[in-house]
Amino acid sequence: MDRLEAMSAFVAVAKAGSFSAAARELGIPLATMSRRVADLEAELGARLLRRSTRKLSLTDGGQLFYTACVRILDDVRDAASSVTGEHQAPKGDLAVTAPVGFGRLHMEPIVLEFLAANPEINLRLMLVDHFVNLVEERVDAAVRIAELADSRMVARKLGHIRIVLCASPDYLARRGTPKHPRDLAEHDCIAWSALGPLSWWFRDSGVDQTFPIRVRMSTTIAESALAAAEAGIGIVQTTSYQAERGVRDGRLVVLLPQFECASTPVSLIYAPNRLLPVRLRTFIDFAVPRLEERLRSIAKSVGAGTQPSAKPPARRRGRAKKG
C-alpha cells in the first residue's frame, strides 16, 4: 500500500462526503478508492469512517487522523515545490491567533486582504485573550503582546503598545486636567474588568506602583469604557491601539504620558522549521510589514509615551490585559 495515496484518498472521501464523489474528483475508479481507504483502516487497526446508506461521517479517531493527514499532505506538497523550484500559488489551511481587541482592529483586516490575494488558502482566525499552545492546538502563527519568555518559537518583533490614560476635551474643560496619578482620586474614572476597580498602575520615580482611583462607571469591555470616555463621563486607562481612533479624531486626549509604565512588545511567533510551508511563509511575508505599519501609525497618533525599559518589571496583578 502506498501510504500517501491512501491518505490522499481518505482526505478526498472525508471532504466529498462519499466515495463516488471522491473517485470522480481524483479521477480513479470507485473500487480503487474504496480499497485504498479500507487498506488504510486495516493498517491502522481503526475505523476512520462511519458508513451508512445515507451518508459518511468521520469517527472521533478519523477526525484526528484527517487533520494530521491534511497537514502532512500539505507539507509534502510544499517540500516538493521547494525542491523542484516550482512557483505555485500557495494553498492549504492556516490557523492564526491573536488577542481579541487587537485581532478585531488590526489582524482581521489583514487576514481579509490576505485571503483576497490568496484564493487557494483557507484560514482559521482564533481571537482569544489567552495564550494558545501552537503545537498542541495546531496553530501556525500567533500575535503575542507580552515580553516573551525563552522558548523554541521564532519571534518577529512588530513594534510596541502602551497603556494610556485618556479623557475627552469636554471632560477636561469641566473638571480640569490631572497633573499626577494621585489626582485621579478626585476625578471620575471609568474602569473595565481587566483593569481592576480601585487602582491603576503608573511609573513614578522609576518605580511601577498603583494609585487609587474613584470609579464613576465600570463596564466589562474596553469598547464600552472608551465610548463612555468619549461621551465625557470620565477618564479611562486602556491600550494605545484601542484609544488610537479617538485620539486621532480629537475625541480623546492622552493624559500623564510621563507616568506610563514601560511599553509592551508585540511579536508574531511561529514554530521553527528549516522548510516553512509555502502558505505560512506567504502569510508571514504579507502580514509582518502591514502589522509593523499599523503599530507605527498607532505610535504616531497616540504619541511616544515612555520607552521600553532595559529590564521590564514583572507583570503585576491588575495591569491591563493586552486584548
Image (cartoon, rainbow, N blue to C red):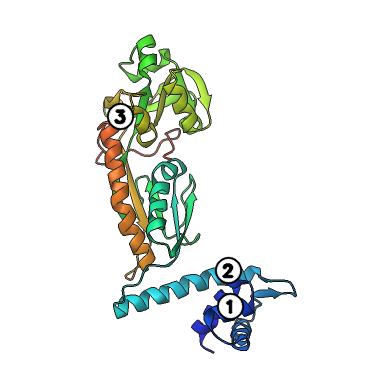
The answer to whether residue 20 is left or right of residue 77 is right
Q: Position of residue 94 (x, y in %)?
A: 44, 61
> Residue drawn at (42%, 60%), measured in percent from left and top?
140
> Residue drawn at (33%, 35%), measured in percent from left and top?
162
Crowd class of label 3 (few under 14; some 14 to 19; many from 20; radius 10 Å): few
> Residue drawn at (35%, 29%), measured in percent from left and top?
164
Kind of residue sitting beneath label 1: Ala
> Residue drawn at (29%, 26%), measured in percent from left and top?
257
Mark whose residue sits in front, 2 or 3: 2
> Residue 244's image quarter?
top left
The answer to whether residue 96 is left or right of residue 56 is left
The answer to whether residue 209 is visible is: no
Mark whose residue sits in front, 1 or 2: 1
Q: Quadrant of the C terminus?
A: top left
- Residue at disc 1, secondary structure: helix
Kind of residue sitting beneath label 2: Leu
Question: Given contact means CB atoms under 8 Å apart, are the residues at marks 1 and 2 in contact?
Answer: no
Asked if residue 156 is positioned above or below residue 164 in the image, the reply reads: below
How far apart marks 3 and 1 lie (CA) works out to 65 Å
Crowd class of label 2 (few under 14; some 14 to 19; many from 20; radius 10 Å): few
> Label 2 belongs to which residue?
64
How far apart marks 2 and 3 lie (CA) works out to 50 Å
Please tell me which residue lies in front, 86 or 184.
86
Q: Quadrant of the N terminus?
A: bottom right
First of labels 2, 3 by sequence position: 2
Asked if residue 51 is positioned above or below residue 288 in the image, the reply reads: below
> Label 3 belongs to which residue?
207
> Label 1 belongs to which residue?
22
Crowd class of label 1 (few under 14; some 14 to 19; many from 20; radius 10 Å): many
First of labels 3, 1 by sequence position: 1
Kind of residue sitting beneath label 3: Val
